[in-house]
Amino acid sequence: MKALLGIRGMGAAELERLVHRARHHATLLPGGRTAEKSLVNITVGMLFFEPSTRTRLSFELASRRLAGEVVIFDPDQSSMSKGETVQDTVLTVAAIGLDVLVVRHREVGMPERIHGWTGRPVINAGDGISEHPTQAIADCVTLLERFGTLAGLRVGVVGDVLHSRVAGSLLHALPLFGAEIVLVGPEGLLPETEHPTTTDLDEVIETLDVLYLLRLQRERGAVADAGYERGYQLDEGRATRMKPDAVVMHPGPINRGVEIAASVADGPRSLILRQVTNGVPARMAALEAVAGVAW
Ligand code: CP
């Protein structure tokens, strides 16, 4: 794999291989640092042109766990402030000697363009509203950890699905493992896909095994009317109507009191912090895959 740009178009075997490798790392991490040093002599560049907490830090940690070197690029402190373009910037960092580029950018397709310009392995850490493949890998690991299998799980993806790059990857990943998806949200925030949709969360909540909540991505143009929280917030009352073993997921950052009540985010059904924890092994597997490390 020369680049990990998205889940769309990926076959089940390829995704299963990544998830399997991530689960392998996940089993080793709780006891301390993994024994594998598969990125030794490889320098990973973090090119985050948009803010991030969990993705950037977990990529950094993943690289270090595997004995790779890490270089952080900060666009605000870079020569882009003097007019250097993204293309010239990435050609420069590649010439400096970065072997693998982890890219987040507000423009759809920028990771692919950077892969084309530099010829370096690239991992998409989120491009506009398009894809966020390593979040989907972390989420598959988290669901497998909880349920053992995804086959037959009914997953409600709730909220601003239209502007979510997390959903952009998840809607392709989960069916490859046999899960069923239903999209839930106001009409203006639901994309056209092959998955069933509803605007009524209360109509489906009792049928779902997983409520995967999404925040309103206002920075990408999401607009919601005044009734949004009443219609789509997972509050305590709604949570009591979930199936006994149903779980709550969210890729973060969460907006407490908007799409999720604080008590639900912190409650026993919540897998939100497991998703974060599993981001590290997911990114370890992704880095190994594009770096050409055999396993
Ligand atoms: N889920 C996610 O991408 O979070 P960050 O923006 O903090 O990386």
Image (cartoon, rainbow, N blue to C red):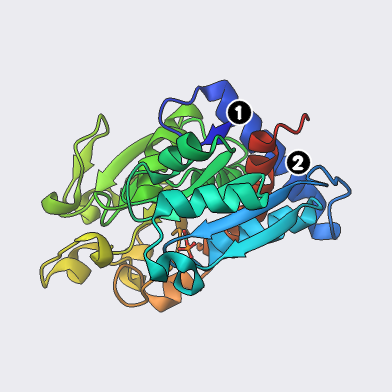
Look at 30% across and 40% down and name the residue there.
Answer: 182
> Which SS class for mark 2?
helix
Relative to residue 9, is residue 93 depicted above or below?
below
Q: Which residue is mark 1?
A: 1
Q: Is residue 11 left or right of residue 259?
A: right
Look at 52% across and 62% down and name the residue there.
Answer: 272
User: How far is disc 1 from disc 2 in space, using C-alphas?
Assistant: 19 Å
Q: Residues within 10 Å of mark 2 (few under 14, many from 20)?
A: some
Q: Quadrant of the C terminus?
A: top right
Look at 21% across and 50% down and name the residue there.
Answer: 203
Q: Is any atom of residue 136 visible in this view?
A: yes
Q: Amino acid at mark 2?
A: His
Q: Which residue is mark 2?
A: 24
Q: Quadrant of the N terminus?
A: top right
Total number of numbered labels? 2
Relative to residue 7, is residue 205 depicted above or below?
below
Q: Amino acid at mark 1?
A: Met
Relative to residue 125, is residue 224 depicted above or below?
below
Q: Position of residue 159 (x, y in %)?
A: 27, 57
Q: Is any atom of residue 6 visible in this view?
A: no
Q: Position of residue 237 (x, y in %)?
A: 32, 70
